[in-house]
Amino acid sequence: MAVLNKIRQRSLILILVIALALFSFVIGDLFKNSDALTGGSQDVVATINGTDINRNEFQQKVKNYQDRAGGRQTSTQSMNAIYNQELRKIVLQSETDELGLSVEKDEMRDLLKNSFSSYPEFQDANGNFDVNRLNAFIANLRDLNGEAAPLGNFMVNYDSWTSNEQTIAQNAVQQTYYNMIKAGVSATIAEAEDEYFGDAKTVDIRYVQIPYTTIEDNLVEVSKSDIKTYMEAHKDTYETDATTEVIYVEFKEGASKADEEKIKADLLALKTDKSEYNESSKNTETIPGFDSATDIEEFVNSNSDIKYSDSFLRAADLPATAKDTLLNSKVGDYYGPYKDGEYYKLSKVLASKQLPDSVKVRHILIPHMGGQRADASVTKTPEQAKATADSIFNKIKSGTKFMDLLELSSDKVSNEQDGEIEFDYRAGMAPEFKAFAFDNKKGDIDVVQTSFGYHVIEILEQKSFNQALKIATLADEIEPSDETLQEVFNKMSKFEIAAKDGDFNALAEERDLTVKPITFKELDENIPGLGSQREVVRWSFDDDTEVGDFKNFPISNFGFIVAKVVDKREKGLMTTEDASITALPEIRKEKKAKMIREKITATTVADIAKNQGQSPKTAAAVTFNNTTLSGAGVEPKVVGAAFGLAEGATSNPIDGEKGVFVVEVTKVNEATKLDNYNSIMNRLNTERRNTVQNKVFTALENAADIEDNRAKTVY
């Protein structure tokens, strides 16, 4: 009771303590997420020229993009694609809005006609675009209140339609903007004349080259300050984004040798019958093995990770590791267990026969509603389509010529070839169509159903017969056992514990683990060989992650890695160490050029060549537009200098790409002026206008005010 009384007496103090603790927790979280204090929004993916990209809308667009891509794009690739789309739209919109460009109603109808005139839904009986059908379709979408309706091979609702309309309008406005700029881009007569003389006027020269290689690299001292000065003078080349440098080791959850031996033993055990006690019948029953199974398909499907295939396989279709043995096997022979990719397999030869590699058939196709590529004009149900195909088949069997019934076929492409199609067994035909053509004999005719509808098919010719096998294969995926998985996890955990107090690299070497380095930018996602690992990148850039921190990450379908941050660099110039890879050769070249120039005292090409131990060279018919110098390679500065000299004149030393040059112009070959330069001017106009679109957007993007928050908001 005394304790309870004291608590009651101090309840106000307790309340204050709890309140202060909660306040501290909230304030701490605010400081951790500084946007909450500064007014920045976690819901803004980026701000471009004052326009925010909303996070929720952005993520919905990303989802739609991924859905359309059908899983072929990672989330990061999808996000980057949508970001680039939004960036382009906003940057260009600010320009088009300022100019007052827009799409009016009549123009919008023309744009929709251009986009959808090929759709049967918007065509009249003559196949012409019908704007009334378009209007009716849009009105119907509006009335469906969000429900989707079919359009071609797609399902669309009113929101997706209006979104598509907006995209079409935006593209039209942007194209108008680009066309306006292109209209102002042109070449002058003077530029056309320069272009002509750049190819037509030539000079003959004599020159001497003192290569940079005449001075050993170890005689040229390059300091860190030299590299830093060079970087400052070439900032565009040496500026980098923020990066983190990470090292990591891998713990792969692969099957052990013991696991593989057990898999092979289990496959072999399936060959023979086994006895098994049945709890229900209280009897010991014999379970048929591969040797005695009567229903091969059921046996394989019940005991294999790959379903049974009843088709005949040619040599090219057989596993490479088993092909030769299987082709030389008799019916009933086994081969295996053998390793094929991610599986161990045990194969049994069921049948062998000669099959053609190519066939020629002719067919009549009767499509039905819902069939693949069936357009709006197809009204038959599947039952009606089959009845029609059966009727055609019966007429042909009764003596009606195949050719007389071709007009009933919807395959207009093959109809132009008398209904004939020739293809080999690897062709991408409907599987049922292909099976009939190759598994039956020349002259056979029947009705065959595929995803396109019902076909009446006649086999006209079969060529290039080769051996084909029907095999039954038991496949067991090579996977680690539970014991192996636990062992991998234990090794990873022990390494991580040891790394807390030990040297990461030394510990890896002790355990025969390879330390792999990787440098990330903030929006990267891939680790070579491991695919998209965005979580690792985010962790390495997290404000709470410091140099020296390490962490384990589970990797889907692989195992684990333990990663350690070894460096974090802010956005700006590279370090002198990193820059030296490319800067050092250029700085050496500059210093060597200066040293070579200081040694040149003579004034003629012949004397300089003699004094420097070089041979003078000649180059004839050098043109201004071709910067390749005979005997020296690409030397734009040297060629340019030659065209600035009068005949008989000698240049000062020129710092070229591969050495210091002195040039003497021995002859100037003037070109005859043209009466008209319009053709050259037109060519220049076309070339410039073809490149202006990308250059304009690049310039607008560089000038835009962009705050990119992707890494913090959605990545």
Image (tube, rainbow, N blue to C red):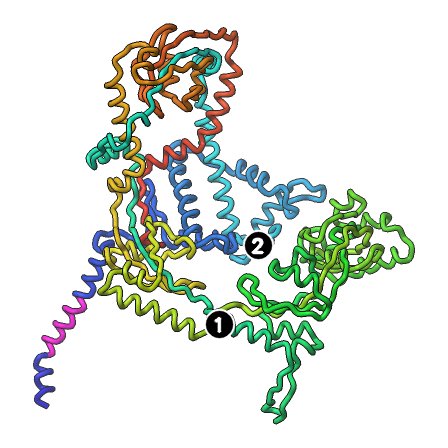
Which circle's residue, 1 or 2, is located before the other in the chain? Answer: 2
Q: Nearer the viewer, residue 710 or 131?
A: 710
Q: Residue at x 33, y 64 (%)?
A: 511
Amino acid type of the residue tagged 1 in the rendering: Asp
Is 15 inside the magenta-drawn segment?
yes
Q: Position of residue 560 (x, y in %)?
A: 38, 64
> Residue reaching furthest right?
399
- The answer to which quarter of the image holds residue 645 is top left
Single out the mark in the foreground, 1 or 2.
Answer: 1
Q: In the displayed structure, does residue 16 sit left or right of residue 687? A: left
Q: Nearer the viewer, residue 524 or 395?
A: 524
* Helix, strand or loop at mark 2: strand
Q: Residue at x 41, y 24 (%)?
A: 634
Q: Nearer the viewer, residue 580 or 245?
A: 580
Residue that badge 1 annotates: 259
- In which quadrant of the rendered image does the N terminus lie? bottom left
Residue that badge 2 annotates: 155
Q: Residue at x 25, y 42 (%)?
A: 575
What's drawn in magenta, residue-wise?
A: 11-23
Is 227 inside the magenta-drawn segment?
no
* Helix, strand or loop at mark 1: helix
Is there any visible trace of residue 37 in the rendered image?
yes
| CA distance separating discs 1 and 2 | 48 Å
Q: In the rendered image of this protein, does residue 341 appear above or below residue 174?
A: below
Amino acid type of the residue tagged 2 in the rendering: Met
